[in-house]
Amino acid sequence: MTLTPTPARRALSHCRMPAPSPLRFTFDNSYVRDLPGAFVRWQPATVPAPRLLFLNEALADELGLDAATLAGPEGAALFAGNTLPEGAEPIAQAYAGHQFGGFSPQLGDGRALLLGEVLDRAGRRRDIAFKGSGRTPFSRGGDGKAAVGPMLREVLIGEAMHALGIPTTRALAVAGTGEAVQREAAFPGAVLTRVAASHLRVGTFQYFAARGDLATLRALAAYAIARHDPALAGTPDAPLALLRAVAQRQATLVAQWMNVGFIHGVMNTDNMTISGETIDYGPCAFMEGYDPATVFSSIDHGGRYAYGNQPHIARWNLARLAEALLPLMASEDDEPAVQRAVAQVTEVIDEFPALYAQALLQGQRAKLGLRTAQDGDATLAEDWLALLQAQGVDFTLAWRRLADAAAGDANPLRALFAEGAALNPWLARWAARCAAEGDPGRAARLRAVNPWVIPRNHRVEEALAAASEHDDLAPLQRLLAALRSPFDESPSSLRFAEPAPPQLTAGYQTFCGT
């Protein structure tokens, strides 16, 4: 099946086509080449007044791009969508998805375009994509635009996650458009340029499975394996092996989220990547006082995507991927083969909790300063979290202050607790566990894995408001500098490490930005 825009859909694109750009990207667009039925060719809308708001110079260098040239007017025109580099083949990708548990058979890039792929300096294939570049055939009545605030949020959270060592999509640039975007009010518009290992999602597979398009589904699975798991190419039961590989990546990823208190906020199947990268920083936030029921998203009324539910939702999403892959594993006319395939994918899904628990405990051991494994370590970590929850202790600072305790001064840690004495029995157990390893460098190792600075919600909002309402990017730049060095404890980063006042945290909500 080939997707083609109708005449009515063609009319959605801006009347003025983007001009050629003098800037060079070395594109090699395998998605367009290998999956002709999985997208619609489209053009970004042109905008009246392009202005570069952010350029990720380090990432540009990783991609083999000339950051100095990108920082000029040509870069602003390119990142706003007014010009396109030679070799770009902009497309809107097709995908479906379960959103808050309900299946939408057609979602797709409603305000995004994949410009193409480049091989970076390390030989890794990376997608270069716009977000907020105007309507597409998948816009479903939306304007396809984006506002400055949500696009700069992608910068802050993505760079914070990268600095924390968590797989993530990243912002290459944000360009202002010079036009207003209407949401609950009028906001200045912007376009994000996002870099990803790929934009393949669980929902991509669901799209073609729901249509019974086995030819494209088969090609998609082969493409995903070639791109993300090349060792599996040509092996028996390759779709099952792909599912197993995705499950392992997602177990590791979600465990990393949990160990820094990150709440994605909208874990729909169209927001779970095959690559294992975090994608879409809309209604996301970092937890402050520890509580597994924490929800910040304004649209998550039932707490489906609460902090503590994230591992369960990851497993649920993987089950949807398994369903989409089943037609590649057995013909529906062969009942024994179908039953065998169902049993195989069910085994993978049922193994996920153990994969996740293993990844979580591995991270917790590091955060507790433990180098070896002992049977009681999971209980030690669980009892620690129970203490934090009982007194609503700040999640990030509690882990950080374990380093002071390891160095011989537990008072900064006790000061975080309303009833410091409640900590003493656990602290004695932890100290005994650490002493059994006899590691004099434990405090330094703890400070290297437990961050001092995370994107505190009030500081993020402060920086975004300054940029959106006052055209002042200085607060964002200061916050970004601190987030890029999350383990460095210094006087200059103190204000970014302090928790928000309780009255702010209690009423804080995040929004999807659409």
Image: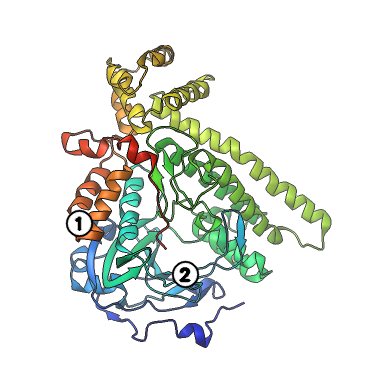
In the picture, residue 393 is in which quadrant? top left
For residue 194, side relative to residue 58 (left or right): right
Tell me if residue 494 comes above or below residue 133 in the rendering.
Answer: above
Three-letter amino acid code at the position of disc 1: Leu
Q: Please give the residue where the numbered disc 2 appears in the rendered image.
A: 110
Q: In which quarter of the image is the N terminus?
A: bottom right
Query: Residue 412: x, y in percent?
Result: 28, 21
**26 left or right, relative to 315:** left
Q: Where is residue 208 in the image (x, y as percent from the top left)?
A: 62, 67
Q: Quick one: SS at disc 2?
A: loop
Q: How far apart are marks 2 and 1 (CA)?
A: 28 Å
Label 1: how many residues lie within 10 Å, few (<14), some (14-19) or many (20+)? some
> Between residues 363 and 466, which one lies in front from this camera angle?
466
Which residue, given by chain and number where applicable, does mark 1 sit on?
473
Is residue 166 visible to us here?
no
Could you say whether the residue bearing mark 1 is in a helix, strand or loop?
loop
